[in-house]
């Protein structure tokens, strides 16, 4: 029967519901019996306390009757008013107190916590012969007042005193004893009855507990025991399944169900073992999606996951056709392992097919997506003798393909390892340079008005004097700082040092504009405007002397996220410039709405403008666009008089380059800034 209930979910719920209700009913009965027992015990205590208070009050009545008699005798003997007045006050106070206590005993009192007499025998003691306590007390109190009544004769007062004395010694004392005895008798009887009820309540409580234990807890324990046995059996049955799942999760990717990196390393090693026996080759292909972060940011991670799932199916089909395996190594990185037997596998053709398969559009939720991938290849045993080195070298080759723009494949070369090792080494040394003094420094290059030759400002340029390699080019360490996140700390350092130098020049009455390069990552952080405004205020620098330069391509890639920061900086009075203009993909509509006041033509266009007609036309177009939008135009990289004359003829406003001055330390440039003007050609030989 129990097994049938246990196997039927509906009957099992009904069984547990009825058991629960029975259990709750038993708890209610127990609670009622416990409360009843508590009430009975409390009643016994209250009864005893009430009796004690009545006995105590009756005893005080006896004392008061004796005190009244004593005071009455002293009043008869007192001859002077000085003795009589205090005795009279105490005498009448005792009479009043006795009267109050008498009525409290007879009728009950909330003030004195005396219960109202409920039995007929006690009522008879107060109001009926042979005791008639109320009449005796009233008569006693009347005699007490008569003793001091001056309207009565001396004989009458003496007679009243004698009657008072007799009543106190006989009537009052005997009647109070009778009252106390009756109270005690009735209290004892009530207590015995309450004790009997309490014994019945306790017996009922014990009986209920026994019934509950037998009919509720015993079946409950038996049911729990059966459920525990079933649960243990279920656990035993699930052990193998859980172990398989844990094994699968350990060695497989949660999203695509493909082997993960840990599993891939084992499989590569297995391929290597086979290749050693068969004298064949093993190919490891690292696949990294290009700009997959843009897909997640623009379409959401859900669609990004769907794309990865479909891509995993495509790669699995390709790998299966060539007797290989595919794995998901990281978020947007996959890997394929193949065995190459002689020349049966045309590798270049295979890589092209792989790239074409990845580039096919993905249709998800009425959205068409297309991605490209960078591919890197490593071979056993030429590029590595073990699984880890093969996978690492394939990944390095893939990174090299990404650095070259993506959507291509590269074979591993030993120089890639050297390049990666150097990159890691420079990143660590750059971190140390930030925390040390003397390695990082600022050079400054003047900006010149092309028409007058007047120095209009300088651009702060970061330099790194490596303790072992000497001066390193920013082209080498700035990309490392961008990728590692160090660009934010470097950018903050440049801002502080640039503003400090600007303040020093202004103290020397050199008021020029300081151009500072700002990384888009500093703008994305969200507090750049507050930080640079605060620094300018602390150093007492007018924001109009500070120009912030941002690279065009970085602006357009992050327009919506940095626009608020740009507008805040412009409102604060800082001048904003688009650096390397012409290399990005700005639209005229966006350019019109941006709060930038300056366009800086990229040096590549300036260098080729003399030789290439198209570059000259492009420079002219940039200058015309800038002026039509009421923006100032600066040309970078001017190195010859011919370039300057061309830019002057095209209407360019300012220029900078080796023709005027190489970037120099602040001390070497101070004299030129104080002069305020550059004689064209006068310093060309020195600067070049």
Image (cartoon, rainbow, N blue to C red):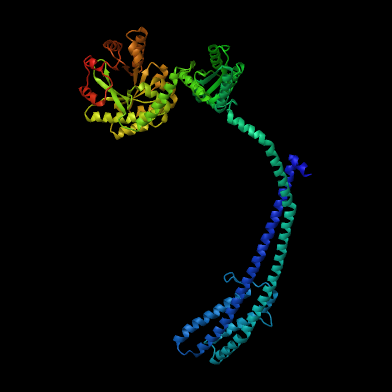
Image coordinates of residue 276 in percent, x first then y, are 56, 20
Give residue 29's quadrant in the image. Answer: bottom right
Question: Is 11 in front, or is 123?
Answer: 11
Question: Is 37 in front, or is 96?
Answer: 37
Q: Is residue 643 visible?
A: yes
Question: Is 406 in front, or is 339?
Answer: 339
Give residue 671's quadrant in the image. Answer: top left
Q: Residue at x 45, y 89 (%)?
A: 80
Image coordinates of residue 561 in percent, x first then y, are 44, 26
- Vertically, is 72 above or below 404? below
| Left or right of 661 in this view: 287 | right
Q: Residue at x 61, y 16 (%)?
A: 321
| Left or right of 560 in this view: 666 | left
Image coordinates of residue 33 in percent, x first then y, are 69, 60
| Left or right of 116 in this view: 505 | left
Q: In which quadrant is the C terminus drawn? A: top left
- Vertically, is 34 above or below 625? below
Q: Is residue 511 visible?
A: no
Q: How many marks?
A: 0
- View extreme (bottom): residue: 155
Q: Residue at x 70, y 44 (%)?
A: 228
Q: In which quadrant is the N terminus drawn? A: top right
Image coordinates of residue 96 in percent, x first then y, are 55, 78
| Left or right of 136 in this view: 600 | left
């Amino acid at each position: 029967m129990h097994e049938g209930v246990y196997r039927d979910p509906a009957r099992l719920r009904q069984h547990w519901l009825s058991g629960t209700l029975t259990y709750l009913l038993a708890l209610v009965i127990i609670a009622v019996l416990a409360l009843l027992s508590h009430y009975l015990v409390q009643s016994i205590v209250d009864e005893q306390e009430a009796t004690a208070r009545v006995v105590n009050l009756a005893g005080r009545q006896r004392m008061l009757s004796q005190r009244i008699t004593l005071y009455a005798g002293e009043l008869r003997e007192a001859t002077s008013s000085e003795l009589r007045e205090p005795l009279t006050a105490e005498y009448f106070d005792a009479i009043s107190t006795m009267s109050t206590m008498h009525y409290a005993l007879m009728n009950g009192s909330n003030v004195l916590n005396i219960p109202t007499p409920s039995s007929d025998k006690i009522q008879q003691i107060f109001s009926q012969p042979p005791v008639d306590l109320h009449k005796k007390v009233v008569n006693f109190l009347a005699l007490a007042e008569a003793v001091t009544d001056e309207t009565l004769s001396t004989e009458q007062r003496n007679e009243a005193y004698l009657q008072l004395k007799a009543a106190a010694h006989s009537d009052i004392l005997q009647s109070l004893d009778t009252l106390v005895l009756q109270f005690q008798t009735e209290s004892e009887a009530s207590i015995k009855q309450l004790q009997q009820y309490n014994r019945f309540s306790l017996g009922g409580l014990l009986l209920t507990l026994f019934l509950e234990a037998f009919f509720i807890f015993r079946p409950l324990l038996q049911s729990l025991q059966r459920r525990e046995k079933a649960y243990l059996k279920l656990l035993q049955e699930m052990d193998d399944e859980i172990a398989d799942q844990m094994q699968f999760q350990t060695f497989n990717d949660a999203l695509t169900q493909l082997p993960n990196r840990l599993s891939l390393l084992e499989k590569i090693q297995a391929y290597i073992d086979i290749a050693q026996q068969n004298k064949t080759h093993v190919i490891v292909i690292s696949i990294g999606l290009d700009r997959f972060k843009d897909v997640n940011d623009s379409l959401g991670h859900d669609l990004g996951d769907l794309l990865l799932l479909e891509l995993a199916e495509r790669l699995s089909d390709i790998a299966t056709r060539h007797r290989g395996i595919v794995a998901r190594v990281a978020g947007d990185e996959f890997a394929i392992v193949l065995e190459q037997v002689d020349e049966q596998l045309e590798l270049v053709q295979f890589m092209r097919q792989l790239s074409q398969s990845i580039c096919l559009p993905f249709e998800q939720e009425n959205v068409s997506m297309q991605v490209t991938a960078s591919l890197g290849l490593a071979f056993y045993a030429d590029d590595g003798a073990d699984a880890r080195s093969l996978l690492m070298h394939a990944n390095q080759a893939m990174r090299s393909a990404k650095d070259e723009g993506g959507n291509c494949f590269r074979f591993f070369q030993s120089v890639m390892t050297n390049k990666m090792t150097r990159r890691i080494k420079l990143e660590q040394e750059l971190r140390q340079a930030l925390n040390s003094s003397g390695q990082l420094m600022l050079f400054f290059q003047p900006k010149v008005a092309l028409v007058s030759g007047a120095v209009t400002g300088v651009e702060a340029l970061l330099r790194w004097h490596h303790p072992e390699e000497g001066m390193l080019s920013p082209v080498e360490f700035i990309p490392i700082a961008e990728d590692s996140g160090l660009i934010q700390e470097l950018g903050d350092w440049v801002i502080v040092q640039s503003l400090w130098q600007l303040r020093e020049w202004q103290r020397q009455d050199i008021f020029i504009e300081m151009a500072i390069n700002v990384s888009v990552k500093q703008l994305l952080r969200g507090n750049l405007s507050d930080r640079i405004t605060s620094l300018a205020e602390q150093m007492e620098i007018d924001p109009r002397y500070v120009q912030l330069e941002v690279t065009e391509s970085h602006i357009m890639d992050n327009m919506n996220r940095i626009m608020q920061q740009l507008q805040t900086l412009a409102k604060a009075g800082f001048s904003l410039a688009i650096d390397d203009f012409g290399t990005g993909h700005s639209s005229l509509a966006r350019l019109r709405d941006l709060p930038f006041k300056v366009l800086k033509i990229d040096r590549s266009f300036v260098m080729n403008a003399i030789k290439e007609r198209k570059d000259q036309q492009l420079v002219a177009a940039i200058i015309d666009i800038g002026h039509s939008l009421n923006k100032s135009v600066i040309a970078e990289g001017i190195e010859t008089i011919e370039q300057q004359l061309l830019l002057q003829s095209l209407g360019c406003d300012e220029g900078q380059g080796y023709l005027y001055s190489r970037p120099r330390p602040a001390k070497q440039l101070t004299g030129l800034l104080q002069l305020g003007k550059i004689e064209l050609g006068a310093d060309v030989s020195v600067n070049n």
